[in-house]
Image (cartoon, rainbow, N blue to C red):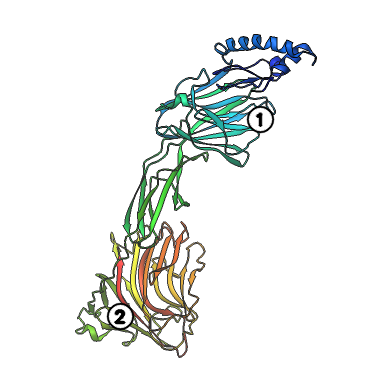
Amino acid sequence: MAADMVALGTGVALRAPDPITSCGLDRTHHSFRSFQFPHRTFLNCFSGNDSMTESMIRSLNTILALFFLGLSSSWTLAATWTNTPLLAARSGSIVAVVDSIPTQPGSGEDVPIGLSSRTASQWNDPAAIARFNGAGTIDVRNDNNYSSLASVVYSAGLRYQFRFKIDIPAQTHTSYVEQGATRTLLAKDVSFRSEQADQSQLSNFAKGVAYGMATISGVRLIPSTPTMAASAIRSNQINLSWNRAVAPSGYMIQSHSVQRDGIEIPKVAGTSYDNTGLVASKTCAYRVAAILSNGDGSALSNGVSKTTLAAPTPTPASMHVQSSNGAPVPDVTKFSGIDGSSINLDNHPFEVQTVQPYSLQSPDSQTLRFELRSGDIYGNYGGTERVELEQQIYVNGTFGYPADTDLHVAYDFMLEPGNRNTSQWVVIGQWHHGDGGSPPFAVALRGEHMQIITRTADTNAEVNMYTDPKPIQRGHYYSMDIWVNFARGTLSVVRDGVPIVSFSGQGKLGTGTSRYYWKHGIYRAPTTNDTQVARYRNFMVSP
């Protein structure tokens, strides 16, 4: 110990009056184990000069030491406490928010703010604590000490918002302070004050004032943290659900923020979300937070991880062809399509739309061959050329699937070697809708490049989701796997096992009221001397 310092013992909880402070005492409400008193400054303060002799100082050492050692066992800090009870005691994980405005500049405040298990009346009552300290900065209590991950200097008259994310069973909390648009992490997973380490619930918000006049307002708990569960449904879909969060009095849950792999996907009003448009055999990690109408959010839920199912293995299409008068075509391997006849693909009926006997053939029980030549104009559709199959699907007596149906088609597609495509546009697969007009989803060709195109009903504007930078490989079977939900606006396209489109945008695919059905073949703008041949095999559609 330095020659001019006197030890005052242990366990002193001291708030010195201003005259003593002016003579060098540090003001603090902490318990401390070794406090050194600069008594020379103290004595000089009272004597008014620096002329005291060493013998005079030594004579006073014993008197001062005994005096302050006697006080150390009896002095307690004078403080004013403000308590705001919660509506009910809380356990588990909570997020608490309070606004506070310091009124004194610099080191003029000594104000702890935090949560306790009961009405606070002394310094060791709160469990999770942040503080405007006497050094002019903000810190957080961690077990027996105050510290901070960042240096935040407070200013009088500014509003500071403290946010405590508290794990009561673990007796830890993570705390932030916001000033303006800046949020600063003060402490992460620090322990409750040591005297409160056994608390299993919190029921009160407390503010203690050693000196200064900081105010608090807006004390509130933001929503309780949901608990999430997940299940893999298909090769492109994981379904999520969670319990309804508890909102504080006077507030309501407006939405839920769902995160996949740390990135928010569209906000959800209810307590479940079917995440479609995923890739087969992919593991995704999810969390969810409840959002109040004022924008406050709960802590993120527990994390759950699920892996989508493996991609389904297409089963051979079963085909049975009938002519328009109901007579069966005798030899399916030598099939020649008749306009208006019905074909069953994957046990779904499709209508043949063609004008030439050569246009639709069946080389084997799994494959259909579509051939379109210049001048093969079908119906009164502006001179367009067509050979296609149209799905004949009725749900509850109405043609087409409802918009909120999870739709899936999978098939192999090959463009035979031959003439280069010269048509302005070519559609080789599409989800069409009962409102007419251009399809809201299409697999297309522009020149020799495959495209994925979508449209919305409000603008009917074409959106190019994907254009293959390489020309189509004629003679190669492309394995296509397409998932779409028009009501949710989700789309996934996987080609040869590689995702080429993964889209989510509610209101950005088709319309929410249309009904949908599948078509494939060749449909194009008129051409001159251009014959194209496409093959489809192993077709399947669901539901």
Cα distance, mark 2 to mark 1? 80 Å
Nearer-N-terminus badge (2/1)? 1
Q: Is residue 392 visible?
A: no
How packed mark 2 is, by other alpha carbons closer than 10 Å (few <14, some 14-19, many 20 or more), is many
* Front one among 142 and 478: 142
Residue 133 lies, with reference to residue 515, above or below; the image says above
Secondary structure category for the residue under label 2: strand
Amino acid on which the number 2 mark rests in the picture: Leu
Where residue 123 appears, as percent x and y from the top left, is 53, 21
Q: Do the residues labelled 2 and 1 touch (CB within 8 Å)?
A: no
Secondary structure category for the residue under label 1: loop
Q: In which quarter of the image is the C terminus?
A: bottom left
* Front one among 191 and 478: 191
Where residue 262 appears, as percent x and y from the top left, is 47, 51
- Quadrant of residue 341 in the image? bottom left
Q: Mark 2 points at which residue?
A: 368
- Quadrant of residue 360 in the image? bottom left
* Front one among 391 and 237: 237
Where residue 488 appears, as percent x and y from the top left, is 42, 56
Q: Residue at x 42, y 43 (%)?
A: 301
Amino acid on which the number 1 mark rests in the picture: Gly
Give me the disc on residue 136.
1
